[in-house]
Amino acid sequence: MRGDLRQALEADNLFARKSLGQHFLLDLNLTAKIARLAGIQPGDTILEVGPGPGGLTHALLASPAARVIAVEKDPRFVAHLRSFFADEADRLIVREADALALDEVTLLAELGIKQPVRLISNLPYNVGTPLLVKWLKAGSWRGPMCLMFQTEVAERICARPGSPHYGRLAVLAAARCDARLALHVPRLAFVPPPKVESAIVVLEDHGKPFEDLPGLEHVTAHAFGQRRKMLRASLKGLGDAEALLADAGIDPTARPETISPEGFFALARAWRARA
Ligand code: SAM
């Protein structure tokens, strides 16, 4: 029989480590709600990064998913998860690894998993953005994503042109996915509470991917690096800025926050063509 999660943590003295961005969700009603937002389908494989004590893992295992792969950097929680969820050993695969360095393709091949994997995670704040960028660039192994970020990052991912939050992250996300802010989660829902508020973002592939994400990262770094400048000035580092903007059909006096993601895709194409 599986015991109570809080009691298990206290019994094993599993306190939160700040250095690993550890803020835990121990309210199983909330984790069940997050699992519902993720739209899990029977037979799905889920990849959860940073399961920690396993509050969200509990909800994922209660879903119709075929299996959950949990990747955790903290060895204390790797041991805890294996023992706490021993009754689910055939559906829960726990790996000790740094998710930033993880080669998901090799891991999934080792496990014999061929279908796209659903990513559902309450991410550590310090690595949330690099992990999202890594997964946006991923190949066909990656399925839909349901991820927790600090609210400010969640707003940047989902922002539309004209919004003060609109920038590189929204453009990169739009290259592959439709992103929506699905749920605000107050700081007091976490143990211990972080300093900032959090939100769940759901990202689903829209099926018309813009493939050159490195090119897009490059041009948006220039464009948004000097947000207040007109693009003809901020893009000087890319070469003949006026010619690039003409190729992409963009007004050279425009500022970056007014340009749609499609405008930046055109700019990245134009830059590649002249590079
Ligand atoms: N999912 C758990 C929950 O909701 O209670 C824990 C969330 S906590 C915000 C982030 C978790 O990610 C911690 O367990 C931490 O040890 C783990 N973590 C931090 N950096 C990591 C990394 N680079 N790779 C894998 N796990 C990491």
Image: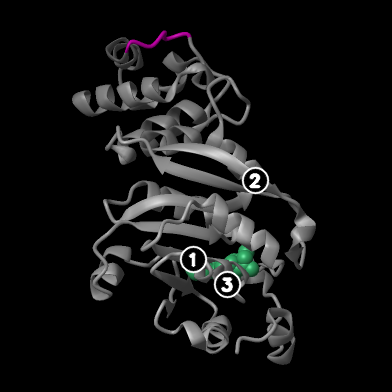
Q: Dot 1 lies on which element?
A: strand
Q: Quadrant of residue 160?
A: top right
Secondary structure type for disc 3 = helix
Q: Which residue is mark 3?
A: 58
Earlier sequence position, callout 2 versus callout 3? 3
Characterize the magenta stretch by its predominant secondary structure.
loop
Camera-side residue of 75 and 81:
81
Where does label 2 land, which residue? 183
CB-based contact (under 8 Å), mark 1 and mark 2? no
Q: Residue at x 46, y 43 (%)?
A: 203
Q: How is the image coloured?
A: one colour
Q: Quadrant of residue 262?
A: top left
Residue type indicated by callout 2: Leu
Q: Which mark is residue 135?
A: none
Residue type at mark 3: give it: His
Give the mark nearer the N terminus: 1 vs 2.
1
Crowding at mark 2 (Cα within 10 Å: few <14, some 14-19, many 20+): some
The type of residue carrying mark 1 is Val
Q: Which residue is drawn at the image coordinates 58% and 86% (left, top)?
A: 84
Report if the beta carbon of the residue with label 1 is closer than 8 angstroms to ligand 1.
yes
Rendered position, 171 above or below 123: above
Q: Does the segment drawn in magenta span residue 54?
A: no
**Which residue in the structure is indicated by mark 1?**
49
